[in-house]
Image (cartoon, grey):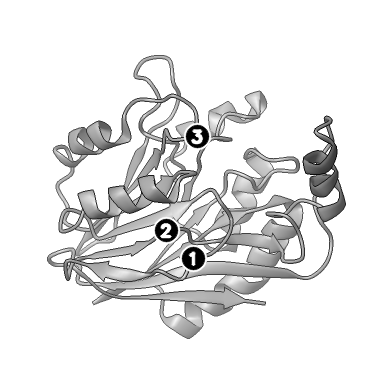
Amino acid sequence: MKRLLFIGDVVGRAGCDFLASKLSSIKREHNIDITVVNGENSAQGNGVSRSSADSIIRAGADIITTGNHAFRRREAMDIFDDDYIVRPANYPEGGCVGSGVRTLDMGAYSVAVINLMGTVYMDPLDNPFTKIDEILETIDTPNIFLDFHAEATSEKKAMGHYLTGRVSGVFGTHTHVQTADECILGGHTAYITDVGMVGPELSCLGVDTESAINRLRFRMPVKFQEAEGACFLCGTIVDFNEKDGKSHKINRIIIR
């Protein structure tokens, strides 16, 4: 039995610093074998930069997943040539840098990490359900984990049920609010609608509350500022059998 830790969206410098201060102790305490972190908001202002990606890897991540802010920073495009980061696999083929799938060689076993983005209330990318079918035909390990970066809970739930028995885990990201519906679907697939975030807890998804409120109250352009104050870290831990890819247990964690 092996153990995978998946950590939700890291927000800004505060999130990166808090991750760096906590991740090594979490991995030791829970005997973590593989760590996956969503880093699409890890740069100041959102997106991912070379500096924020390096910070997440130094903290102890094996793979960084992303989402709709993957290409927000043009100067960071070369990051996606590295083998430790993925972008949504359903970006149109041709002309899009990077890969939507990375496979970790752990010696006696391997683990595939896939990144997909939803299309309900999101950018009009290729159909994620069609794309995952194509991807699964090319993967030769039973240990498959998906970061499904999506807005609508219905789309995330549908993807979890669609992939029941076909992948080891489906982790929802993007909304930054950890949900309480973690479960094992069909005795095989670990699922949670949203893993949560890493960053200032008293905030609007990591953003300073006053600027977020003013944007919603007055409907005028507002420059969002990263919130200050105490941070928290949200994630899930999954126990899976590396021989057949079946997940047996999923637990949420919140570290304050």
Cβ–Cβ under 8 Å for marks 2 and 1 = yes
Q: Residue at x 64, y 38 (%)?
A: 47
Report which quarter residue 110 is drawn in: bottom left
Q: Residue at x 59, y 58 (%)?
A: 58
Say which amino acid is labelled 1: Thr
Q: Which quadrant would the N terminus be assigned to in this image?
A: bottom left
Cα distance between the residues tagged 3 and 1: 19 Å
- Specify few, some or many for label 3: CA neighbours under 10 Å numbering under 14, 14-19, or 20 or more: few
Cβ–Cβ under 8 Å for marks 3 and 1 = no
**Residue 121: numbered disc:** 3
Cβ–Cβ under 8 Å for marks 3 and 2 = no
Q: Residue at x 76, y 51 (%)?
A: 207
**Residue 179: numbered disc:** 1
Could you say where residue 180 lies in the image, as x and y percent from the top left? Answer: 46, 71
Cα distance between the residues tagged 2 and 1: 6 Å
Q: Which residue is disc 2 drawn over?
A: 193
In primary-sequence order, the first of circles 3 and 2 is 3
Say which amino acid is labelled 2: Thr
Left or right: 165 in relation to 68: left
Above-or-below relation of 47 to 201: above
Cα distance between the residues tagged 3 and 2: 16 Å
